[in-house]
């Protein structure tokens, strides 16, 4: 389980990233990837709908780490589909084996779906070096898997509040 370093910085239109790859810390990264925040924020509320907004920014990566991250982003939907189908099959087998009622199938399915989705998210999260955890009008919270990169990012952008360490 990786330990993530959180950095809270003032919100701005443009963030400055160190001239290092956040995945492997190689100098002079040669490609940029667009990353999106984990959570959205409410941008507008209308009579029949709400509009949500995700923060997106370009982060410099080396070619190898950029390829790995792009590959895992493509696997994201496939893993979710596999987790759902696997949970359905598991719930069906257990329900048939134990001769449970229909509600038993749904209880087992939901439990298996939650566990398999958490496992898939853990697999994907460990292959991300940078995350945007949350944002509001005043601050943005980034998480980094490397402490050196987090300190350099903090130096370039200014820190809005004390740094905290979190387990992902």
Image (cartoon, grey):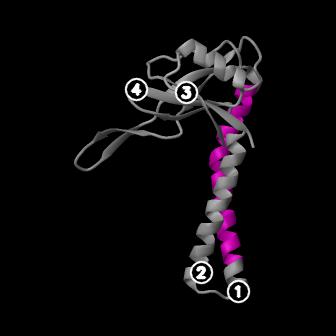
Magenta range: 65-93
Residue at 60 percent across and 78 percent down: it is 105
Residues under numbered marks 4 and 1 in contact, where contact means CB atoms less than 8 Å apart: no
Q: Nearer the viewer, residue 119 or 87?
A: 119
Q: Position of residue 124 (x, y in %)?
A: 69, 43
Q: Nearer the viewer, mark 4 or mark 3?
A: 3
66 above or below 1?
A: above
Q: CA distance from mark 4 to mark 1?
A: 54 Å
Q: First in sequence: mark 2 or mark 1? A: 1
Is residue 132 something one can see in this rendering? yes
- Which residue extends farthest front? 162
Mark 2, Cα crowd under 10 Å, few <14 / some 14-19 / many 20+, is some
> In the structure shown, which secondary structural element does the residue marked by tag 1 occupy?
helix
The stretch drawn in magenta includes residue 87 = yes
Which mark, residue 19?
none
Q: Which residue is mark 1?
A: 98
Q: CA distance from mark 1 to mark 3?
A: 53 Å
Residue at 22 percent across and 48 percent down: it is 47
Q: Which residue is mark 4?
A: 138
Residues under numbered marks 2 and 1 in contact, where contact means CB atoms less than 8 Å apart: yes
């Amino acid at each position: 389980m990786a330990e993530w370093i959180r950095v809270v910085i003032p919100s701005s239109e443009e963030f400055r990233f160190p001239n290092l790859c956040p995945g492997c810390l190689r100098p002079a990264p040669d490609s940029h990837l667009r990353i999106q925040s984990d959570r959205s924020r409410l941008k507008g509320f209308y009579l029949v709908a709400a509009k949500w907004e995700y923060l997106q920014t370009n982060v410099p990566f080396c070619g190898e780490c950029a390829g790995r991250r792009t590959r895992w982003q493509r696997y994201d939907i496939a893993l979710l589909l596999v987790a759902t189908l696997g949970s359905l099959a598991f719930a069906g087998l257990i329900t048939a084996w134990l001769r449970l009622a229909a509600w038993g199938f749904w209880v087992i399915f939901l439990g298996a779906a939650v566990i398999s989705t958490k496992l898939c998210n853990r697999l994907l999260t460990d292959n991300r070096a940078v995350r945007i955890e949350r944002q509001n009008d005043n601050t943005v919270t980034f998480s980094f898997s490397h402490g050196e990169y987090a300190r350099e990012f903090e130096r370039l952008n200014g820190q809005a509040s004390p740094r905290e360490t979190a387990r992902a």
